[in-house]
Amino acid sequence: MKNLKSSSLAKILAFILILAFAAVMFISFMGVGVLYSYGGYSGSSLEGVLRNYLEPWCVNKMLNNMEGYRYGADPEELDSTIGMTFTIYDQNKKVVYDGLGSQSYMLETSPYGFWYPAEDSAAYNAWMWEEEESREGIAPIPSISPDIQTAVIQAEDALSSPQPTAEPAVTPSQEPQTSASPDGENSGLSGSMSSPEPSISPAPTAAAQTQEPAASPALTAEPNQSAYVEAAPVPVRYSMVGYVLDTVTENSEVATMTKIISVCFAYSNLLLGVMVAGALLALACFAFLMAAAGHRKGCEEIQSGITERLPFDVLTVLVATAGVILMQLLIGFSYGDANAAKLVAYVLIFEAAAALCLWWCISFARRLKIGNVIKSCISIRLLLWCWRVFKKLMDFVGRTLKGMALIPRASVIIFGILFIEFLWIVGFGAGGGFMLFSWFIERSVLVLLTLYVLLCMKKLLKAGKEISQGNMDYHVDTGKMYGPLREHGEQLNRISEGMNKAVNSRMKSEHFKTELITNVSHDIKTPLTSIINYVDLLEKEEIDNEKAKEYIQVLSRQSARLKKLIDDLIEASKASTGNLNVNLERCELGVLIDQSAGEYAEKLKAAGLELVITKPEEPVVIMADGRHMWRVFDNLLNNVCKYAMAGTRVYLNLDKAAGKATVTFRNISASQLNISGEELMERFVRGDSSRNTEGSGLGLSIARSLVQLQNGELELTVDGDLFKVVLRFKAID
Amino acid sequence: MYNILVCDDEKDIVSALKIYLEPEGYRVLEAYNGQEALDILDREQVHLILLDIMMPKMDGISTVSKLREYSNVPVILLTAKSEDTDKVLGLNIGADDYITKPFNPLEVLARVRSQLRRYMRLGGSSSGESTLNIGGLSLDDGSKDVTVDGEPVSLTPTEYEILKLLMNNPGRVFSPREIYKLVWKDEPYGAESTVAVHIRHLREKVEINPAEPRYIKAVWGQGYKMERGKKNEKS
């Protein structure tokens, strides 16, 4: 099979076979077609089929004769048509002209009525109408009379001239008609034509009757119109019967067709079989040719031929054009009488068309197999090229726009839209439904775009607000944004990311600092232990030198201070970075104040201070870590003992208002305070720098950090010499 | 004559402690890391160990855990680490006391004495039914005597009543108001801070270091409580 497929010989053979089978099929198809169109396959006899062919032909000729007769031609001259003749009857069924004479005939048509003479369209119309009606066997309706009535006056005169010429032929017409009927094969024909005859006789009488009453009222009504009517002869009704003669010339179309039909009828079934077989065989060869298309000896892959160099659509157009030309040729040939030469021409044209079609099909099959049907189309390529050019243009425009700064870009876009609108208006005019509609659509799109931009801007605004309020985790969704909006959104995201990073690294460094301070402090503590211990030992030695004793005193004091400093340092760094465990639990501030006051009772007395405590009756409870709270009170009371002026009162207030618990420490500073409360809370800052004996300067800072760790606030105010610390916590019930 | 093992990688600290301890009549054995301490323990009879935590070779924590496998000797940790977590870890692993650097020599002496008394003298001693014991603290309600590690302590009647109240309910937190009502048998009317003053005095008498009390603890913002006796403490 593969060998067969790649064999050129087989292919050429297949090609020729297809054409041959197609020709056979075409010829048999024509035969079948002719036979079918004349009823050859609906069970009629050969006579019926021939009649079906001959009668229209005969009627066509006869109608020409009628026309000629109506316009005054001599019936004998008209009767020269080959192979056919006719007889004319007047309205009384009298033979006016007999063209048949003693000739035998093959076919007789139904009688056809007409008016003589036919001057105006009304008469012609009437004839047409009459012909239709007479076929049905119904008498003409009197409605024709109004058109004729005006011509009644001259009726007798007008009729007189044709009548005498027709009269002599009346009698012989009847005889041959009856004598011909027993003649062989024509008997069936004569039988069929006998039925219309009785319908002829009542029709003219009816027409004649209607003429009389219709004409008289018109005459009496308008007598002065007679001069005008005179010109038009009064039409009289005749009927005509056509005959196809036996003596049809051998070479005439009728003879050929009759022969063809006879032969086809004889082999009608064979014709059908040949047609179907030809079609099937041609189809089979076609299938093989399609399958073999593109295969060549010695090549595995599909090969493209010369035809395939032509773009597919060009080939298609060429083939289609050739097809149209062939079709025109076929139509041109179909005019005129049919003969053998024409038949051959038909077949040749068909063969040419089939060959063309086959050629196209082979090429199509090859292209299908290669898979470049669409790609090889020059129109598709052209479209693709146009699309590429368009895309490049758009890219170029997009790049140019992108390269521009925001304001020029926006200006270019806005002016571009304006310009297009302008062109649109110029092109379509300012009015008109289409113009208005397209304008509305365009504007709607613009409005939607604007809304979209506004929506994006709203998102960006919200993001900006969130970030400015310290919500660093806020992330703008830039997925549905474009251009500068997206850029802006991403920048906002980057800001929050950058800030987050900064905050995180700062937290880390704070943590590291705490760690460092703690570790360093531990390392300092070990040598410090030795210093303290050996100073202590020195103190115990008996030393006579007073100065040495004094120096040892200083050493002792300063080493103790160093120890305190280190402890405070560790605590401060821990508290400020939140590097402490905080266990929040119920803490009664009243109790804490009592406990703290108890702890500091002696110390305060020693400092010459009087502590005044005021607190509400009911307990004030907050959520706090008791140990850290004690540390805060410890630091604050320690401060009071150190810096309050001796002999003054120290006020310690506890209040609860609006869900807030407030503890207030108030005392009079011993020395002048010339710095603000905020500054006092800075680490290592003390109210009086000259006082360097005690304290690290970290007490307030630690207190504030601890309060903040427990979700409270510490506020410090200096008002003259009044030193005030306020602690605020959220009170719970 | 008690043998005290002092173990610290700082020679100066060891010798300073030696200077303090020897006049008190203790024999001081010196070690400079955990391994040395354990070696000495194998050779000599040791009555108390003063142990640094951060040391080379073997640190104090692992030394204690090793030591506790076979010895009951009191251990006082001596360290620069002052965080709560460090203290808790040290005590849980089996140490008996904890002193942070830089230390007060007198405090060290007091704690050494306290531990030794309890280790040597009070082991298993039990008093009558009317005696309340918590750690080294004991209160005899019959004789109204209070002793800390065997040493008698003199308290005022109010202080005694407060101590008795707290020792009768170890672990329970009493608010100053409650204590006032129960001890003074009266409404406080704003005199709650008096309780705090008395507690402070009491602590100064009972505790070795009142700033870091072992028995009478303040629960800040709530009240006071008596610490429950430790499980691994001899009584």
Image (cartoon, coloured by chain):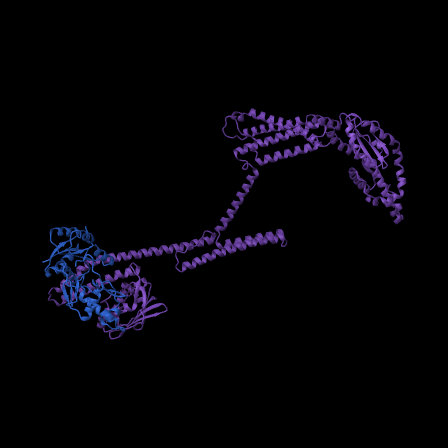
Chain colours: A purple, B blue
Q: Residue at x 33, y 64 (%)?
A: A712
Residue A643 to residue A530: above or below: below
> Which quarter of the rendered picture does the C terminus of chain A lie within?
bottom left
Name the outermost residue toward the bottom. A647
Front residue of A459 and A711: A711
The x, y position of residue B73, in whole percent, is 15, 55
Dividing the picture into quadrants, the one containing residue A193 is top right
Residue B8 visible in this rendered orientation of the protein: yes
Residue A699 to residue B44: above or below: below
The x, y position of residue A637, in whole percent, is 26, 69
A82 sits left or right of B163 in the view: right
Front residue of A9 and A28: A28
A301 sits left or right of A67 in the view: left
Q: Residue at x 47, y 58 (%)?
A: A458
The x, y position of residue B109, in whole percent, is 14, 61
Dividing the picture into quadrants, the one containing residue A386 is top right
Front residue of A454 and A256: A256
The x, y position of residue B218, in whole percent, is 24, 65
Dividing the picture into quadrants, the one containing residue A200 is top right
B24 sits left or right of B84 in the view: left
Name the outermost residue toward the top. A9
Across the whole image, how many numbered discs are drawn on residues?
Answer: 0
Front residue of A567 and A64: A64
Residue A355 to residue B27: above or below: above
Residue A683 visible in this rendered orientation of the protein: no
Name the outermost residue toward the front. B129
